[in-house]
Amino acid sequence: MFTDKMILRIPGPTPIPPRVQQAMNAPMIGHRSGQFSKLFAETAERLKPIFGTKQDVYILAGSGTSGLEMAVVNTVNPGEEVAVLVSGAFGERFAKICERYGIIPHRLEVAWGEAVTPEALEAFLSEKPNVRAVFATQCETSTGVLNPIRELAQVVREKTDALFIVDAVSCLGAVPCEMDEWGLDIVVTGSQKAFMLPTGLAFVAVSERAWKVIDNNKPQAFYLDLKAYRKSLADQTTPYTPAVSLVFGLAEVCAMIEEEGLDAIFKRHELMRDMTRAAMSALNIPLMTEDQYGSPTVTSLDPKGAFDAEELRKVLRTKHNIIIAGGQQHLKGKIFRIGHMGYCEPLDVIQVISAIEMSLRQIGVEIELGAGVKAAQEVLINHV
């Protein structure tokens, strides 16, 4: 095997297209130059359709978590109450960020693998009349659940005056997001998922409604002060040193997205989800989520003790150069997760399913070779 040919099939970071890698290799330019300002402003403008918004999208040097923290610290003051929808590890991250800033989070928790329903949210909010914001995760990476953000936003809009703030880190660019139409107040994502870039950029879009709240709040952050980013973007720059090479790459990613078209991208990801789910069902490996809530970007599987998920991952890595993800927190060592987003297409899914079948046999699991591949192929053929 080629030891430098590792195939990433995890829910981030994802593979980087060669043309994007090449764009990032361009010679460095001054981050306060007119050349960079033009590129930066044009690229920020090109992000708007991906968010489904006419509002500005702010680009900061930092991981997706920096964007989540930015969304918290600019909108809610210490001592105020918020609702946090927790369907896995990343919903809980929102709650922990709130607690760090002295904000009181009321957790609406569902079992890992389940989605938060509009009915559950409506009942929860009826008992929490003082919440200033509702924080939700669109794709819960730890479980492969795609929460029904549009319907949840409708509940928040109709039943409260709270802001609705969404972590879309592991799905934006691969699934529909209509920020303006759905009534989302802040949407956050990161560069290393469907945006096909290395880790290092966060993107944050803010509604006019959210800006009214932010403008009335006393700033609590320095680097993460959204007002500073708004002021700088008006001047086609950033308040602090930008990640120039990543912005070069981002411009190329925007070109790729525009060439394929968002609708085609969404359909491709739905197809890869359906292929993966059909394959795993054919292999009798239990899916963690119901079909209606299965994410187009990551699929989580729970062997339920039928085999060792970590042993499977090890064989995939050492024998076939394929990396898939394990479980997090209390699911560590119990489940495995297959990422299928960004620079990934249906034949890549066939590859990883075939490798999983061989690896299962290699760890002593009696499965019919080709059963999963056949199921995935049938989904693909019928789609075409």
Image (spheres, grey):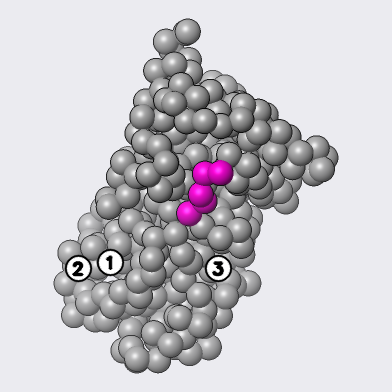
Of 175 and 323, nearer the camera is: 323
* Residue 356 pos. (x, y %): 52, 29
Task: Tell me the distance, in whole angstroms, between the alpha carbons under discs 1 and 2.
Answer: 6 Å
Q: Residues within 10 Å of mark 3 (few under 14, many from 20)?
A: some
Task: Tell me the distance, in whole angstroms, between the alpha carbons under discs 3 and 2.
Answer: 25 Å
* Residue 266 pos. (x, y %): 67, 50
Q: Which mark is residue 175?
A: none
Residue type highlighted by circle 1: Ala
For the magenta stretch, what is the residue range?
284-288
The kind of secondary structure element at disc 1 is helix
Looking at the rendering, in which quadrant would you find the C terminus?
A: top right
Q: Residues within 10 Å of mark 1 (few under 14, many from 20)?
A: many
Q: Which residue is mark 3?
A: 148
Q: Which residue is mark 1?
A: 95
Q: Is residue 260 above or below residue 132?
A: above
Residue type highlighted by circle 2: Glu
Relative placement, left or right, of 359 versus 255 is left
Q: Nearer the viewer, mark 3 or mark 2?
A: 3
* Residue 185 pos. (x, y %): 47, 71
Marks 1 & 2, CB-CB < 8 Å contact: yes
Q: Quadrant of residue 269?
A: top right
* Residue 229 pos. (x, y %): 38, 56
Relative placement, left or right, of 158 versus 215 is right
The kind of secondary structure element at disc 2 is helix
Marks 3 & 2, CB-CB < 8 Å contact: no
Of 258 and 192, nearer the camera is: 192
Can residue 38 be seen here? The reply is: no
